[in-house]
Amino acid sequence: MSDLENKNQDAPKKRPYNLREKKEKKAAYRSLIRPELADELYDKILNIVVVEKKYRDPNYSAKDLAKELKTNTRYLSAVVNSRFGMNYSCLLNEYRVKDALHLLTDKRYADKNVEEISAMVGFANRQSFYAAFYKNVGETPNGYRKKHASKK
C-alpha cells in the first residue's frame, strides 16, 4: 500500500455539509429548571412554533419566542435543550424539514424548485436548507424528491 492510501485510511471520514457528530453535554443549568414550568413552556413552545407555524418565518429568533413567552432566552434555551434534546435552531430546522418532506412529494408543488420550497418552509438560504435536510433525512432534497417521484 502506498503512503497516500495509508493516509486516506487513517483520515477521519469527511461528513457532507460540514455536519458534526452530536455530542452529549452535561449542562448544570438543566437541574435548575422547575419541571412544572418547563412542561408549561414546552406546550407553549410547541403551540407557537408548530401549530402557529412560526418555524416558517426565517427571521423568527429565540429572542422573539422568549418575548412571546414572557421569559428570557437563557431559560428558553434551557427548556428547549432539556425537553426537546436539541437547541432552538435545530428544533426549528427539524419542523422545517418535516414540512419540506411533505411539499417535495406533494403533486401541487411539483412545479416549485427546491430553493422555492426551502424558502416556503422558512430557510434563509439554500446551504442551510441542504445541511439541515441531509442531517435529518440522510439524503439531499433533490435525491429525496426523485426517489419519491419514481415510487408514484
Image (cartoon, helix red, strand yellow):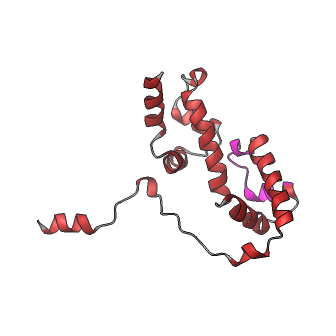
Q: Is residue 79 left or right of residue 124?
A: right
Q: Residue at x 88, y 60 (%)?
A: 70
Q: From the viewer's perspective, is residue 30 above or below residue 36?
A: below
Horizontal and vertical percent position of residue 63? 77, 59
Quadrant hosting residue 118: top right
Q: From the viewer's perspective, is residue 96 above or below residue 82?
A: above
Specify whether residue 63 is painted magenta: yes
Q: Residue at x 17, y 63 (%)?
A: 5
Quadrant hosting residue 71: bottom right
The front one of 96 and 149 is 149
The front one of 101 and 60 is 101
Horizontal and vertical percent position of residue 111? 54, 22
Specify whether residue 75 is painted magenta: no
Q: Which residues are magenta?
A: 54-68
Q: Is residue 152 left or right of residue 53?
A: left
Horizontal and vertical percent position of residue 29? 73, 75
Horizontal and vertical percent position of residue 35? 82, 67
Q: Residue at x 66, y 75 (%)?
A: 27
